[in-house]
Each structure stands twice: as C-alpha cells, then as structure tokens.
Amino acid sequence: MIDSKVVPLFKKAAAEDESPTMTGPAKCLACEHEWQTVAPVGTCQLECPSCESTRATFKHPCGVPVGELVRECNCGSRIFYVTPNGVHCWLCATTQEF
C-alpha cells in the first residue's frame, strides 16, 4: 500500500497504462525519411519527425494473413483510399482498376 504522504512524480493515465502498442521501422511516403517508432495498435498514419507530414506508415504493416493476395499500386504503395468514386492510391492518387 502506498503511504498517503508519498506523491508519485510521474503518473500515467489508466487508459495509457493498458493500451497495447506496436513498434517497428517507419517510413514517410512524402520525404522518404525512415525511423523507429511506437504507436497504439491500429494506428494507420504516422507523423513524420522530419517533414511533419502525416503520410508516414509502418514499413511492415501487420494484419494480412500469410499467402493472402495484397493489392499494390504501380508506384509501390499498398495503402489506398476507398471512396464512392473508386479506389485511389494514397501515395500517387492514381485511381485503381481491378
């Protein structure tokens, strides 16, 4: 039990203590900067520490089962926006045709 006279210097929020995180190499799709990062599980976009754009992502995304077909744009990106007007590459904005 903590003595009521002891004041913790650093106290994290309960939600922060219990939140799972991912760690690994990241790459900015805008400026090509690479670094190691930590982010909450489920994070898709990262802020680049070099150019401050939010067009960065983990280099090795997780979640796709081994052997499953993965769509890749001609520019090399595997990240897409799905809109009512079609599927568009996040990096070069090319509309994808399947």
Image (cartoon, grey):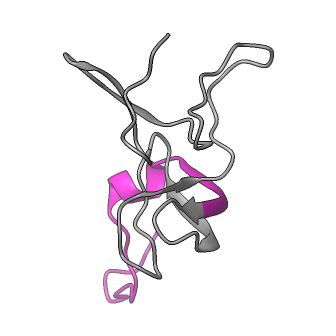
* 41 displayed left or right of 65: left
Task: Give the vertical position of 50 relative to 19 (above or below).
Answer: below
Residue 29, image x, y percentages:
51, 59
Residue found at x 37% / y 27%: 95
In the image, 52 versus 29, the foreground residue is 29
Residue 92, image x, y percentages:
42, 46
Which residue is situated farthest in the left direction here?
84
Q: Quadrant of residue 5?
A: bottom left
Task: Give the vertical position of 75 relative to 17 (above or below).
Answer: above
| Residue 6 is covered by the magenta coloring | yes
* 17 displayed left or right of 35: left
Task: Give the vertical position of 83 relative to 5 (above or below).
Answer: above
Residue 64, image x, y percentages:
65, 23
Residue found at x 58% / y 43%: 75
Q: How many marks?
A: 0
* 50 displayed left or right of 38: left
Residue found at x 44% / y 45%: 44
In the image, 3 versus 40, the foreground residue is 40
Residue 12, image x, y percentages:
37, 69
Residue found at x 45% / y 49%: 19
| Residue 19 is covered by the magenta coloring | yes
Task: Give the vertical position of 17 relative to 49 (above or below).
Answer: above
Magenta range: 1-26
Q: Quadrant of residue 74?
A: top right
